[in-house]
Amino acid sequence: MRRSWSATASSVALASSESPLADGVRSPSCAPASRSWRARTACSGSPPRASSPTSGGGRRACRAVSDISPSAASSRSTSWSSCPARSSWCTGTNACPRRCSPSALRWSPDAGTAARPAAGPASSSTRSRRPRICSAPRRSRGTRGASPLCSTAVAVSAASTTCRAGYVPCCAARASTPLTRRHGESRGGSAVVGRGRRRTARRPGSGCAVSEALRLAAGASLTLAAIPAALTLANLPFYRRAPSAASPTKTGRRGVSILIPARDEGHQIGATLEAACATRGIEFEVVVLDDHSSDDTAEQVARRAAADPRVRLEVAPALPAGWNGKQHACWRLADRARYEWLLFLDADVILAPDAANRLVAAAERSSAALVSGFPRQRTGTLLEHLLIPLIHFVLLGFLPLIGTRYTRLPGFGAGCGQLVLARRGPYVDAGGHRAVKSSRHDGLQLPRALRRAGYRTDLVDAIDLASCRMYRGAGEVWRGLTKNATEGMASRIGLPVWSVLLLGGQVAPFLLVAALAGGRHGLEPGSPILTTALVACLVALVHRALLAARFRQSWWGVPLHPLAVALLGAVQYHARLLAELGRGVAWKGRVHV
């Protein structure tokens, strides 16, 4: 229902040169572009009309229009013409509009002059109040949302109203006749509008830009936290485990060559061979290529080969120029394999007995030339608990697996170099590891090479097929992730993008909560900005907890998730810095640049 305001006065006069506050200062311009209800009518370029009980115009007018005592109406014809231009009404010390209480004004007991207020008590028709700056944000009646922070200082007399230059006449003192709000009969008729409360003054403009920036930051962090969480939920139905058994092939004979490149793996090669030789449900052979190890890796494999004819030991030739050590070893192993299916296995991966058979079944079911999966990652130290589980977080949170499963676009190719099964024909046709000979990230580059050749690749959940402890200790974790980073997140183009996606959605919300929880910047606990940041934190932690439960990961990474993501970002920037300086990372006696 429309509300109207009634008052005894019909106009107000604005003077531009007779301000009692400062001499020689221009009066403010009129008619704000925002057409706010406080000033649109008062400075419209002509004397304002008196508020009508039914017109509703008083609601849109500056309070100064309807609250001036009746004696002020006599001066409208002489002083209203001096109202200046309309271009910059509210552009004094701040650009955002203000809502002020009547305590912002002062009245002069002398109705005939614009002098300073006279000392002594005010009469019943006039009052004297000290001017102050109205800068505290408040919510006005009849409006939604407060627009804070605009400096106001108005001097009002019975004869004229003057405004100092650079200030906005947001409201006026109350006259002897109280201002009323008229309602319909169903709402009890008219009621007297109460006085505004006094507010503690603050510096004009403080907090306005900061609050807006914090509001935008909280909203952006919630969006960046929700995107990977939603994509993870969408990806889980496509990230399926391998089927239980393979069906017979058309050619009748099925076999797999388990190919293991090994360099200085004497501390774990025995367990790897033991698990590989326990393979069942499919014909197999185990071929280990010793890549110039400096420990007893070759001796252990030789003893096992002497006891089990299914195991063979090969020795790698000298590393050619332009080749990465692992890619060269895998290419040599593929050349010496006997079976159609080639299962490339890192020397620290422990296979399940039915793993090879189920991987072949997965490849046949999806008609894929290459199938890969991420084994269950075993961790021991704190840095391993924090960083290694982020593999699944990045994979499922930022790669749409529907594209991996149903398209052949190279950009959707992904895999894990620890466990890769490829069919010999498509592998050789696409160039195999020779096509990615200089890469340090064969798990990512090899599937993309086959996709560029027109073949399909697939990705399965391999936590029940194999397990692996990728690195041992904080030093190995840092160096191991650094040596591969420049082919992934730490590329020149990818690093800024990944910084926004990871740090903005997984770290920034926690920093915002820490900054806002104490009520800084005028934000009390429970404010919308703080609530938004808390929701973003909750989304990030629930997302991380879901992955920890689904893939049997360490729970240490859940409460420390923002720290883990920050450390992952530090690894990427360290790798980028080394690449720009032309320095490499030492790994097992070789320097990877």
Image (cartoon, rainbow, N blue to C red):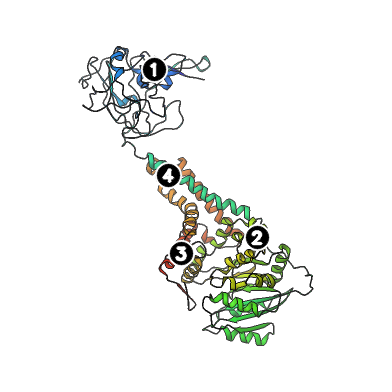
CA–CA distance in space, label 1 to label 3: 66 Å
- Name the residue located 62 percent from the left edge and 70 percent from the top edge: 419
Mark 1 or 2: the one toward you? 2
Identify the residue under disc 2: 408
Amino acid type assigned to the residue bearing label 3 in the image: Val
CA–CA distance in space, label 1 to label 4: 38 Å
Amino acid type assigned to the residue bearing label 4 in the image: Leu
CA–CA distance in space, label 2 to label 3: 31 Å
On residue 179, the disc is: 1
Identify the residue under disc 3: 571
CA–CA distance in space, label 1 to label 2: 74 Å
Which residue is at the front of the view, 387 or 186?
A: 387
N-term-proximal mark, 1 vs 2: 1
Question: Is residue 158 positioned above or below 29 on the image?
Answer: above
N-term-proximal mark, 2 vs 4: 4
Q: Residues within 10 Å of mark 1 (few under 14, many from 20)?
A: many
Task: Report which quarter residue 86 is drawn in.
Answer: top left
- Tag 2 near tag 4, CB within 8 Å: no
CA–CA distance in space, label 4 to label 3: 28 Å
Identify the residue under disc 4: 214
CA–CA distance in space, label 2 to label 4: 42 Å
Q: Residue 255: percent from the left, percent from the top?
A: 73, 75
- Kindly state the secondary structure of the residue where label 2 is placed: loop
Count of residue discs: 4
Mark 2 or 3: the one toward you? 2
Q: Residues within 10 Å of mark 2 (few under 14, many from 20)?
A: many
